[in-house]
Image: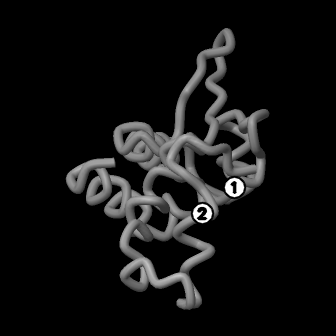
Amino acid sequence: METNDAIIALTALGHAKRLAIFRLLVVAGAAGRMAGDIADELGMPGATLSFHLKELVHAGLITAESQGRFVCYRAAFDVMNGLIAYLTHHCCAGSPQAECGPVATARSPGDACC
């Protein structure tokens, strides 16, 4: 992941509603959630939800798949893992004795999260 991509992703996640949406989609896993279900679960008006979904899609953190008249949203686990790898790449200067060592080496950017 490049620095600018990380900044875009972190900026998108830096809003409470977008973070809630993203976390809901992480829990949903590969099945994802329909936009209406997300709105109901989070008590968010459709227009507000649409705005936040657009920002998350733009950041690459979620994907959108049309299913007839409805849209299913899913967390982009590969992007999330890439962001985590980017953030922890030089964790504790690579010291194997450091507490964060297992976090930095547990996954490579291409590994599946869940």
Label 2: which residue? 20
| Above or below 73: residue 82 | below
Residue pictured at 69% horizontal, 37% vertical:
36
Farthest residue, direction left: 4
Count of numbered tags: 2
Pick the front one: 12 or 97: 97
Q: Amino acid at mark 1?
A: Leu
In the image, which disc is placed on residue 24? 1
What is the x, y in percent for residue 18?
49, 58
Question: Which corner quadrant of the image does residue 58 belong to?
Answer: top left
The reply to whether callout 2 and callout 1 are in contact (CB within 8 Å) is yes
Tag 1 secondary structure: helix
| Above or below 96: residue 86 | above
Q: Is residue 86 left or right of residue 29?
A: left
Q: Is residue 31 left or right of residue 75?
A: right
In the image, which disc is placed on residue 41? none
Residue pictured at 46% horizontal, 50% vertical:
82
Pick the front one: 39 or 102: 102
What is the x, y in percent for residue 35?
64, 36
What is the x, y in percent for residue 48?
47, 50
| Above or below 84: residue 77 | above
Q: Amino acid at mark 2?
A: Ala
Farthest residue, direction front: 96
Q: Residues within 10 Å of mark 1 (few under 14, many from 20)?
A: some
Tag 2 secondary structure: helix
Q: Residues within 10 Å of mark 2 (few under 14, many from 20)?
A: some
| Above or below 18: residue 77 | above
- The alpha-carbon separation of the residues under discs 2 and 1 comes to 6 Å
Residue pictured at 43% horizontal, 62% vertical:
13
